[in-house]
Image (cartoon, rainbow, N blue to C red):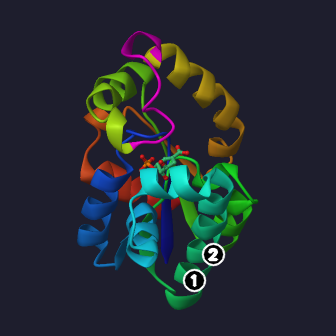
Amino acid sequence: MRIFLIGFMGSGKTHWAKILADRLKLPLYDLDMEIINRERRSIPEIFSNSGEEYFRLKEREILDDLIDNNSSMVLSCGGGTPCFLNNIELMKKYGTVAWLNTHVDVLLQRLIKEKAQRPLLKNVDDDDLKSYIIRKLNERRMYYQQADVTIDNENSISVNYLVETILHA
Ligand code: S3P
């Protein structure tokens, strides 16, 4: 069983992936961390020195490797993972994709504190962050919506609800 957690930056992917992997006794991976470990540099460094296109190619390469090497896992994806290189189709073919459809106001609260680690956000003024999130989410929704399962209100669900919803899919 492979479970792919997708959603916007700050949607809770890392948090819920840990809980799911623990509950289902599955190996846990975080795609951003895999990229950082293999590249031996941070994501802002990769973006600024090699560009987003390079990052997206690495992201895909590592996604392929993780799928090849793990017949079961929980993978916390990057916010952009499903939106490039047909990654959403790949993930749906090899597992169950769950979208954390976290509310914009919750994303804003979380991201305003964590902008620096995210190259796409670091140059966005705090005052413009909400409209940036709304615009980017609108661009990405067509990919996120292809998930097998949509989890609304991630900040008020229980672990049991999440597990049952995903296993049911
Ligand atoms: C990105 C999200 C980040 C990381 C990179 C690009 C995006 O992951 O992959 O900064 O395009 O939304 P998180 O969603 O874990 O912040």
Which residue is identified by label 1?
A: 65
Q: Main secondary structure of the magenta part?
A: loop
Q: Amino acid at mark 1?
A: Asp
Assess whether mark 1 and mark 2 are in contact (beta carbons under 8 angstroms).
Answer: yes
Q: Amino acid at mark 2?
A: Glu
In whole angstroms, how far apart are the C-alphas of marks 2 and 1?
A: 6 Å
Residue 41 vs 119, above or below: the answer is below
Residue 133 vs 79, above or below: the answer is above
Mark 2 C-beta to ligand 1 under 8 Å: no
Is residue 75 toward the left or the right of residue 134 in the image?
left
* Residue appearing at x 49%, y 86% in the figure: 70
User: To which quarter of the image does residue 151 belong?
Assistant: top left
Q: Sort mark 2 into few (<14), some (14-19) or many (20+) by Cα contacts within 10 Å.
A: few
Is residue 125 part of the magenta span, yes or no?
yes
Image quadrant in which the C terminus is located: bottom right
Q: Sort mark 1 into few (<14), some (14-19) or many (20+) by Cα contacts within 10 Å.
A: few
Number of numbered discs on residues: 2
Asked if residue 98 can be seen in this view, the reply is no
Report the span colored magenta: 118-128
Which residue is identified by label 2?
A: 61
Query: Residue 49 placed where, x, y %?
Result: 54, 56
Q: Nearer the viewer, residue 104 or 42?
A: 42
- Which residue in the rendered view is the most extreme toward the top? 127
Asked if residue 134 can be seen in this view, the reply is yes
Is residue 70 toward the left or the right of residue 80 in the image?
left
Is residue 61 toward the left or the right of residue 20 in the image?
right
